[in-house]
Image (cartoon, rainbow, N blue to C red):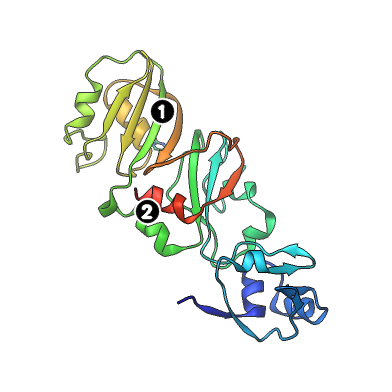
Amino acid sequence: MSTTFRLDRLLANMGYGSRREVQQLVRMGAVVLDGTPLADPDMRLAATPDLAQRMRIDGVRLDPPPGMAIMLHKPLGVTCSHKEAGALVYELLPTRWRMREPAISTVGRLDKETTGLLLLTDDGDLLHRIISPKRHVAKRYVATLARPLRGDEAAQFATGELMLEGEDKPLAPAVMEPLSDTVARLTVTEGRYHQVRRMFAAVGNHVEALHRDRVGALDLPADLAPGKHRLMGEGDIAAVFG
Ligand code: URA
């Protein structure tokens, strides 16, 4: 069963203007559902995903209704924050999406200097399911290191006993595979602050570049260029938990 919304509130919450501006759009016949202009801004309708195919605003397809999930290829140098100085990940999305209520938020964060697969959603339940420690959703990174691997890192990360500086709870076991002397793939199931950088610091190394290429079983699509985003379908969401 999907929730129903008043048309003017739904469109206002999707960033199409104030309630009053949206009511005006409806009166002008600019809001069309299944080919028919809607006349009543008070009408209730279900915000099902197919609404984006069925509704046009000023002749343009409706944005995805609430309950959207997005994958973004985060480029270097942008911050996962709504309000910090400098370039923000939200500025990589269409302008109107920044005015949505509920707001679109990142699912966890990647550091400003980390690139790769970043998920965003306006669905609080989905967000919490992905970041919940109970779900153990794996996050896979490729780290480029300042110094050659010593050879004991994978064993240390696998113990479930490694302690990060300033913390009192050991890290859950993590899987590391060397890709070369100075490049390693690391899969973690937690989301501690600067976790991967701090893990390599704990074994005497330094991460020079960090890229996330997978969340759960969802890979960063090879054809999704840095800075670009794509809506997630049900299969993509299932893959995160797969
Ligand atoms: N670990 C880090 O150190 N940084 C990230 O952005 C993600 C994981």
User: Mark 1 CB in 8 Å range of ligand 1?
Assistant: no
Relative vertical location of residue 58 with respect to residue 94 in this rendering, above or below: below
Mark 1: few, some, or many residues within 10 Å (few <14, many ≥20)? many
Q: Which residue is mark 2?
A: 130
Relative image position of residue 225 (x, y in whole percent):
60, 35
Taking the spot 36% from the left edge, 52% from the top edge, the residue there is 131
- Disc 2 on helix, strand or loop? helix
Identify the amino acid type marked 2.
Ile
Residue 66 visible, this angle = yes
Identify the amino acid type marked 1.
Val
| Residue 142 badge | 1
Q: How many numbered marks does the figure carry?
A: 2
Relative vertical location of residue 185 with respect to residue 37 in this rendering, above or below: above
Query: Quadrant location of residue 98?
Result: bottom right
Taking the spot 67% from the left edge, 53% from the top edge, the residue there is 94
Relative image position of residue 70 (x, y in whole percent):
53, 52
